[in-house]
Image (tube, grey):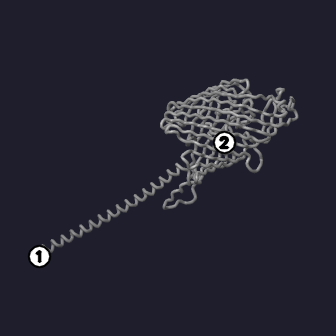
Amino acid sequence: MQKTIAMAAMLAAAGAVQAADNADLAAIRAQIDEMKKSYEQRIATLEKRLAQAESNTRTPTAAVPPAVSEARQPATSTASGFNPEVSLILQGQYKGMKDVAERGISGFYPAAGHDHGEGAIPGISKRGFSVDHTELVLAANIDPYWRGQAIVALVDGQAEVEEAWFQSLGLGYGVGLKGGRFRSGIGYLNEQHPHMWDFADAPLMYRAMFGAEGSYVQDGAQFKWLAPTETFIEIGAEAGRGANFPGTDRNKNGSGAVSAFAHVGGDVGVSNNWRAGVSYLTTQAKAREGHFEDIGGVEALGKFTGDSRTWLADFVWKWAPNGNPKYRNFKFQAEYFNRREKGDFSCEDADSANPGACTGGVHSVYRTRQSGWYAQSVYQFTPNWRAGLRYEQLDSGHRDFGVNAANLAVVDYRPKKATAMVDYSWSEFSRVRLQFAQDKSMLGITDNQVTVQYIMSLGAHGAHKF
């Protein structure tokens, strides 16, 4: 009897232990199931956010709101939170060419470049070795809705603010806004910085339009709209101070220059794509100075006051096998401009001790209609080597100086220039270029030029525009 009771007690105890073990196992399985469900929900949420981010990257719509963690961060950020993209562009050269006292483009209004110090030699006239152009770039997202960038150009021991702008990131509906100092969106080459150029210097066309710097920089505001279509369609407009050539700086309310542009483009198969555009710039000048020569060989100071209107057309074609430009690619680009100016022109001899035809100042009408173009192609035949050709020609066209036509030594001329280059890039951050050019932009002078240039990029470096 006692044995039977003991056996029953042992069986009951074993059942209780087994029941307890089963309960623990069930609890563990429940916890595992709960963790699986939680992680699956989190993964699904992250995948959804990733899909939204990729969609907004492909199509410029409203910005994705910043992720908010369960424990919210303080509204104010610390100084260590500012982490901008910093880069330094080193661009220098050796240039061999003829010694010409005042380089210019015959038949076109002399456009003064940047004056980086009294007695300095302008960049386009500097022979031998030089640190041509150095740029310090600071850029960062201000918040999820705006981005800012500042570029300080360092030339001959002085610094100037080349660009300083803010730009929208996600206003939606393909709308983009930019404000501050920026390179205008007109044409094709104008928005590109010198280190992005395929040749060591700007085309004659851009120097004739905008001066020695070869680009039009605007202080103002820019509006862009990108159409939600498979074909690339971009429309933009700008309003700004208009202080740079062909305009002049004026102390006035409102805008001094207005521009508009439209670009279209697309793909042709897998290996080809293109872009074409048309642009318009209108601005005003007040006593815009330029150095001329009167009929007696005396230097004369001309001053133009009036309207300047410029039309531009651009076209770019790119080819890369199967759309991969790393090993081989080809680019063709061409631009054309037509400018008309109308207003008042005054002529005054600069040397009072040697009076000439413009003594006392002579006022007259001034009307011009001028044009020009360039075409270039660049072929990258290995991952490191490229070669290119460029030909350009301008037409001084019809120029009416009124009564001052009898006082000034002005002639009609068609400046020309042919250029060949080859460059080697160790990476996207380092490049050396050798360039040969025959320059006939000055009447009666054929200048055979040799340029050796280096371009080195330090730090963060964003992708170049199309």
Q: Position of residue 44 (x, y in %)?
A: 43, 57
Q: Which mark is residue 441?
A: none
Instruction: Give the mark nearest the N terminus, 1 or 2.
Output: 1
Q: Residue furthest bottom?
A: 1
Please state which amino acid type lies under the numbered disc 2: Ser
Q: CA distance from mark 1 to mark 2?
A: 111 Å
Residue at screen point 53% across, 35% down? 319
Instruction: Report whether residue 228 is seen.
Output: yes
Q: Which mark is residue 1?
A: 1
Please state which amino acid type lies under the numbered disc 1: Met
Q: Is residue 288 left or right of residue 72?
A: right
Residue closer to the observer: 292 or 97 = 292
Numbered disc 2: secondary structure:
strand
Quick check: 214 above or below 14? Answer: above
Q: Quadrant of residue 90?
A: top right
Q: Which mark is residue 279?
A: 2
Q: Quadrant of residue 116?
A: top right
Numbered disc 1: secondary structure:
loop
Residue closer to the observer: 185 or 90 = 185
Q: Position of residue 358 (x, y in %)?
A: 85, 32
Q: Position of residue 75 (x, y in %)?
A: 57, 60
Quick check: 27 above or below 151? Answer: below
Q: Is residue 117 left or right of residue 89?
A: right
Quick check: 9 above or below 163? Answer: below
